[in-house]
Image (spheres, helix red, strand yellow):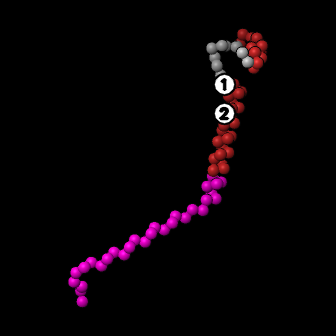
Amino acid sequence: MSATQAALNELLPLAGDTFDKNKVTPGILGFLVFAALAAGVWGLMKSMNRHMGRVDFQEAPEAAAPAAPAPEGPRAP
């Protein structure tokens, strides 16, 4: 058993009869982790938009197709 679990077991009697062992909720730690992940994704998206705005991309023109040979046959005068 880790020290953290031992400390939490000591605090368990303070919850009294209101503690339901069958009900599990994420609590404040779950909210903080979710908020940190959301802030990280927001920061990454903002950074990506800034970097994509700096890209100066111009597509290279297609290579000129060789001129089609003139059809053979009689020419009109």
Q: Earlier in the sequence, mark 2 or mark 1?
A: 1
> Disc 1 residue type?
Pro
Residue 66 included in the magenta stretch of the image: yes
Q: Percent from the top left, x then y, of residue 6?
A: 75, 15
Q: Is residue 27 visible?
A: yes
Alpha carbon distance from label 2 to label 1: 10 Å
Q: Percent from the top left, x then y, of residue 7?
A: 77, 17
Report if the CB atoms under discs 2 and 1 are less than 8 Å apart: yes
Which mark is on residue 34?
2
Query: To which residue does mark 1 refer?
Result: 26
Q: Residue at x 67, y 13 (%)?
A: 20
Judged left or right of residue 70, residue 34 is right
Which mark is on residue 77?
none
Q: Residue at x 69, y 36 (%)?
A: 36
Q: Tag 2's secondary structure?
A: helix
* Near-viewer residue (51 or 66): 66
Q: Tag 1's secondary structure?
A: loop
Number of numbered discs overlaid on the protein picture: 2
Q: Which residues are magenta?
A: 49-77
Residue 68 included in the magenta stretch of the image: yes
Q: Residue at x 33, y 75 (%)?
A: 68
**Few, some or many C-alpha atoms within 10 Å of disc 1 (few <14, some 14-19, many ≥20)?**
few
Give the residue at the far bottom of this rendering.
77
Q: Quadrant of the C terminus?
A: bottom left
Compared to 43, does 12 lie above or below? Answer: above
Q: Quadrant of the N terminus?
A: top right
Q: Percent from the top left, x then y, of residue 32?
A: 71, 32
Compared to 68, does 17 lie above or below? Answer: above
Q: Percent from the top left, x then y, of residue 48?
A: 63, 50
Q: Is residue 15 visible?
A: no
